[in-house]
Amino acid sequence: MDWDQLSKAMAAGRIGRREFLGRAGALGVSTALATGTLARLGHAEEAPRKGGDFKLGMSGGSTSDSLDPLTFTDMVSLNQAWQVANGLVEILPNMQAQGELLESWEAKPGAAEWVFNVRKGVEFHNGKTLDVDDILYSINLHRGPNSKSPVKSVLSEITDIKKLGSNQIGITLSGGNADLPYILSTYQLIVVPNGFTDWPNLIGTGGYVLERYEPGVGSLAKRYPNYWKPNRAFVDTVEIKVINDTTARTNALLAGEIHAMNRVDRKTVALLKRNPHIQIVRAAGGQHYPFLMNCEKGPLTDNNIRLALKYAADREQILKIVLRGFGSIGNDHPIPKTDRFFNKELAQRPYDPDKAKYYLKQAGLSSFKIDLSTSDAAFAGAVDAAVIYHAAAAKAGIDINVKREPADGYFDNVWMKVPFCLSYWGGRPTADQMLSIAYKSDAAWNDSFWKRPAFDKLLVEARAILDDDKRRPLYWEMQRMINEDGGNLIPMFADFIDACSTKLQGFKPSPVFDLAGARISEQVWFA
């Protein structure tokens, strides 16, 4: 049965919704097209129903994980925290900022002074009613002089934050920032009761109450009956199982041991599509997989070496083999084509072994050898990407020694520790947020240790401009600076690819993160 026949069968009522979705997936039809066709035919999603035990298999967990928001580095902790707690601002699938516990806001002229309204009638799991002091405490956790939060530098432009009334706060910035609500959507900014520090027993205002938490193993959460969002949190329980091995995670989905999984291996997408009980959920966005060069260590301090390594990457091959085409070519900066400030005039860096040799010669070398640490904990296919890079770089006289690292603890023991390694970024809703978190000189997650005062000056200047046409040239220049001098070799942007049972409904892809922007647990229900 082809797509046309399948659509006619659905229109005639010869097959049900679930069978339609399963067969559409087997034909390679996108979830968006399939669900859109259903809506057109008058078979939109069923009304949400409560009940059932949702099991989620995830990569990205480690025994060193914590629910302390100052420590979040990977997706398991994020998904667990957002089951139990809420953030300040939510980013919708259309990339618009929507109030969460900060219900609404207004900026004064110049965007340096803001007023935010705290949502009323919200209850913590211990029965306490949310108030302004809880919001102030949760933000200030990341701002203190001894804070090691990765978002401390992002929040450093806040010069004053104070209580204006029983349900209102005021934030004053050192300079204007039109993107402040987006900054406050940063996933580490979950809200807890004033003074709370018992992180293994996290208490929040989210849709689920934490019942069990085992770092690197999993968690269990139970639906909170007084959740303030009327159309979220439908399942009775959510269990996260940490399954870092991609094959094991896929087999668990096929066997029905879990209902959804993240980081699908692109090699298995075609296989999973043929299964009528499984659907693929795909979203394009800012997710990218950098090869990180520490600009402060050894030979990588020389930009000639960094440029040689960038020209030695066969991006087309990596995209074709590792991502199976589920993504786009990267150009050694983190701003995707979907961003309104993407520099479309910046020339794409090609694979050019001769040019790589030229830059080696500029560094006084005829050949070069370096260790590249990798693990599929970084992203599905990271080891394959390193091996492909090894073969391509050899033609430029560069010997890439691929070091396979243990998955457990990769982001504690390897990332930002070794001179050259693979990593991933989920992207951010705005260019300013991405650049502030990972490229500003004093950013805690400046994982290439690239520090340029001229870049920092442009970044601060750009964020204070309210007119996009005036901001754009500054963001274009920052992308050029990173491309030509930075420590990130970014060969590709990867689509988010998740998979789930066709029993699940309500799973909406997000360009921000995988698993519905890490909000799958409160969105889905069972048909």
Image (tube, rainbow, N blue to C red):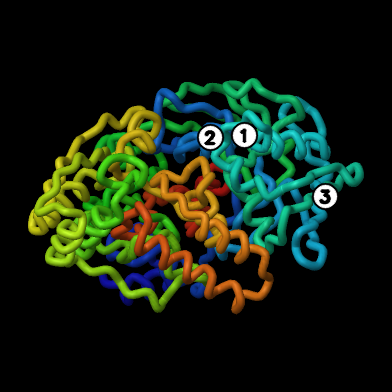
Q: Earlier in the sequence, mark 1 or mark 3?
A: 1
**Coordinates of residue 482 in the picture (x, y in percent):** 40, 60
Q: In which quadrant will I find the N terminus?
A: bottom left
User: Residue 288: where, in percent of width, then height?
Assistant: 37, 55
Q: Residue at x 38, y 43 (%)?
A: 261
Query: Which circle, 1 or 3, is nearer the viewer?
Result: 3
The residue that mark 3 highlights is 170
Residue 516 visible within the image: yes
Q: Position of residue 239 (x, y in %)?
A: 48, 31
The answer to whether marks 1 and 3 mark residues whose Cβ atoms lie closer than 8 Å is no
Instruction: Answer with left or right where residue 320 lies relative to residue 258.
Output: left
What's the residue at 38%, 74% (across, down)?
Answer: 346
Marker disc for residue 80:
2
Q: Can residue 279 be seen at all in this image of the molecule?
A: no
Q: Do the numbered discs 2 and 1 sit on residues whose CB atoms are within 8 Å?
A: yes
Q: CA distance from mark 3 to mark 2?
A: 30 Å
Q: Is residue 493 left or right of residue 267?
A: right
Amino acid type of the residue that numbered disc 1 sits on in the rendered structure? Val
Disc 3 marks which amino acid? Gly
Q: Amino acid at mark 2?
A: Gln
Q: Which mark is residue 84?
A: 1
